[in-house]
């Protein structure tokens, strides 16, 4: 009589062709080994506070509202807050930033025990009106950047600079005074 082996025993005897070859590991020792990312990989963006002027272009372009702009006119501060947990890595913020302050990275590890670790805050001083002393909606860096990129010889840079540091009300008063004097048509 022929001895019949159970199916599980037959499987133990069966050898796969690739078992005779050297085995290559399928997994890596991540996170202990650096994982190579493709150059086109979009990681978590980062704000360079030295380059940021606080214009808010990134805030307007961000679909998931990962970037928020807040004005604290009592303390004269404009605050840009980036929450990496909300970011979908579309890089619209990187594309629209006029100064290159929003920079793409290859960082993809965002796991953390605290949500606060995923938040970046950049604060800018708001410019003050030279006449009344109220804070403007613009940062000092925004006005400096605007004056820097204006082409020479086309605009009256001194006139623009003078009016840029005035609030809306003082700018309106100055325009009315100039019209009354006949200086502005």
Image (cartoon, rainbow, N blue to C red):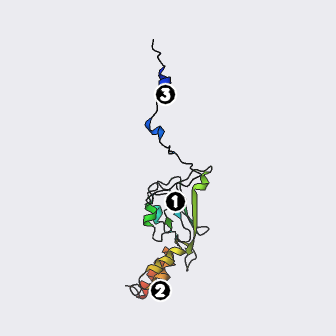
Q: Can I make out residue 58 in this image?
A: yes
Label 2 packing within 10 angstroms: few (<14), some (14-19), many (20+): few
For marks 2 and 1, give the CA distance: 33 Å
The residue indicated by pointer 1 is 68
Q: Residue 75, how many percent across, how many down?
A: 62, 68
Q: Closer to the N terminus: mark 3 or mark 2? A: 3
Seen from the viewer's position, the closer of residues 176 and 146 is 146
Mark 3 residue element: helix
Q: Mark 3 near mark 1, Cβ–Cβ under 8 Å?
A: no
Mark 1 residue element: strand
Whether residue 46 sits left or right of residue 182 in the image: it is: right
Which label sits in the foreground, 3 or 1?
Answer: 3
Seen from the viewer's position, the closer of residues 161 and 120 is 120
The residue indicated by pointer 2 is 158
Seen from the viewer's position, the closer of residues 3 and 6 is 3
For marks 3 and 1, give the CA distance: 64 Å
Q: Residue 113, how many percent across, how many down?
A: 62, 49
Label 3 packing within 10 angstroms: few (<14), some (14-19), many (20+): few
For marks 3 and 2, give the CA distance: 90 Å
Mark 2 residue element: helix
Q: Residue 141, how many percent across, how many down?
A: 53, 74
Label 1 packing within 10 angstroms: few (<14), some (14-19), many (20+): some
Residue at 50% x, 28% y is: 12
Q: Residue 101, how many percent across, how many down?
A: 50, 68
The residue indicated by pointer 3 is 13
Q: Closer to the N terminus: mark 3 or mark 1? A: 3
Question: Vertically, is 116 above or below 77?
Answer: above
């Amino acid at each position: 009589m022929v001895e019949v082996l159970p199916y599980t025993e037959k499987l133990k005897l069966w050898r796969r062709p690739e078992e005779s070859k050297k085995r290559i590991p399928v997994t890596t020792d991540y996170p202990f080994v650096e994982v190579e990312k493709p150059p086109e990989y979009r990681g978590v963006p980062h704000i360079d506070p030295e380059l940021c002027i606080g214009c808010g272009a990134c805030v307007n372009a961000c679909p998931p509202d990962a970037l928020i702009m807040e004005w604290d006119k009592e303390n004269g501060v404009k605050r840009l807050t980036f929450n990496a947990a909300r970011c979908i890595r579309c890089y619209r913020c990187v594309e629209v930033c006029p100064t290159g302050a929003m920079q793409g990275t290859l960082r993809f590890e965002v796991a953390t025990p605290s949500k606060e670790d995923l938040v970046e805050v950049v604060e800018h001083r708001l410019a003050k009106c030279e006449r009344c002393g109220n804070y403007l909606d613009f940062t000092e860096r925004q006005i400096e950047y605007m004056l820097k990129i204006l082409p020479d010889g086309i605009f009256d840079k001194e006139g623009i600079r003078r009016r840029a540091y005035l609030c809306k009300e003082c700018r309106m008063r100055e325009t009315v005074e100039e019209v009354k004097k006949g200086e502005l048509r």
